[in-house]
Image (cartoon, rainbow, N blue to C red):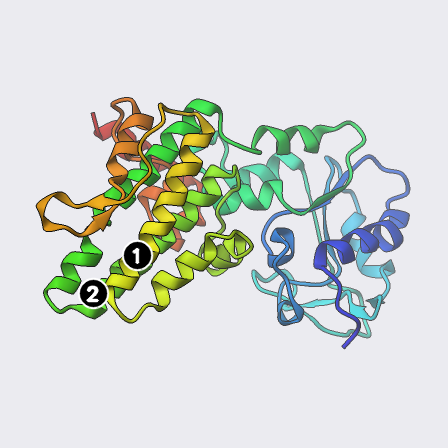
Amino acid sequence: MPEFRPGVELAGLFYREAVRPLLDGRPHLAARIGPGSDVLGFDTERSTDHDWGPRVELFLDDPGDLDERLRDRLPKRFLGWPTNFVPPGARVRSMADTDGPVNHYVTITGLGTWLRDRIGADPGWLAVPWQRLAELTGGAVFHDPGGELGAVRRRWSWYPDDLWRYVLGCQWARIGQEEAFVGRTAEIGDDPGSRMVAARLVRDLARLFLLQQRRWPPYQKWLSVAIRSDPVAADLAGALSADEAGRRSAALCAAYEEAARRQNALRLCPPLQTRRRPFFDRGYPVIGAGRFAEALLDGRAPIGSIDQICDSTDVLERPEVCAAVSDAAHRTVP
């Protein structure tokens, strides 16, 4: 196997040394964005088995014979990696050597067409999955002389402040709806149930911490990786590994308190008390997450973004369905 290097770095070299010389000066934009662990910076040697390798996104209005030109003239290998991918044009492709034309992984399309495919024709903020926003604003841009692609990425880099407050409020509301269940399930001897609830809360907390940092939470495979360098990751891991409900709740409460302190530091709502407290007279330790939800939501219903509404991959991968689901959810709730 050739020496591994991050896929975005490989893509940049591939564009500059192999692809750009074949463009004959035609106007274009070039980047490595969109699907792929490399765009999020999470790729490893394991990633090389599919959808990874010498690849790049080219945006131009009139591709002409560019696809055929690249097929005929790209090198068969670049820095030791095959530039040919099989099956040609499939949704999932892998590098493979060839003696014929190169079935390359250079996406050639107009920027508008690519955006419609990835986030929809007329996307509203709450209808675009966080993963898609991470893919659009991650990776790297290699050629953008007029700044068109940079402007698109800046536009979608983060929510406007009012929507940020709203989405944060919805995330706190999700936690508030289940934070007492870790203790309640344990009280009736349902330790597996307590663990399940704890895992759901850890997921919601990980997303909350990323949202507080103005970072798009990736989908489930990369969520833990995205948060692992944060000191609070130790508390989240402790909640997942604890064999006793009391220690499980204590780890969760430590994470709740840190989330509360960070929320106050953002000054998006009046500061609130950050210490854990008993859940009414039942005594289960909680943070009272609903307090933060109420302070951030300003009376709005905690419906939230499409990721807070829906957990179906088949929905989240289809922009038109995301838009329909989001619109219906917000339109039918007072």
The residue sitting at 85% across, 37% down in the picture is 26
Query: Would residue 273 appear left or right of 150 to someone viewing this image?
Result: left
The tag earlier along the polypeptide, 1 or 2, is 2
Name the spot of residue 148 as percent of width and height, x first: 71, 29
- Local secondary structure at mark 2: helix
Q: Is residue 125 left or right of residue 253?
A: right
Tell me which amino acid carries mark 2: Gly
- Give the answer, above or below, for where 188 lies relative to 30: below
Image-quadrant location for residue 174:
top left
Residue at left offset 12%, top offset 63%: 187
Q: Position of residue 56 (x, y in %)?
A: 73, 51
Tell me if 174 is positioned left or right of 38 in this view.
left
Identify the mark at residue 193; answer none if there is no mark: 2
| Callout 1–callout 2 Cβ contact below 8 Å | no
Q: Is residue 163 above or below residue 288?
A: above
In percent of width and height, residue 80 lies at 83, 71
Q: Residues within 10 Å of mark 1 (few under 14, many from 20)?
A: some
Q: Dot 2 surroundings within 10 Å: few (below 14), some, or many (20 or more)?
A: some
Work out which quarter of the rendered image holds the C terminus and state it. Answer: top left
Q: Which residue is mark 1?
A: 250
- Residue 163's disc is none
The residue under label 1 is which amino acid type? Ala
Q: Nearer the viewer, residue 166 or 133?
A: 166
Say whether residue 325 is visible. Answer: no
Closest to the camera, between mark 1 and mark 2, is 1
Question: Foreground: 266 or 196?
Answer: 266
Question: How many numbered discs sit on the rendered protein?
Answer: 2
Viewer can see residue 82: yes
- Residue drawn at x 60%, y 38% as measured from the top left: 113
CA gap between label 1 and label 2 equals: 17 Å
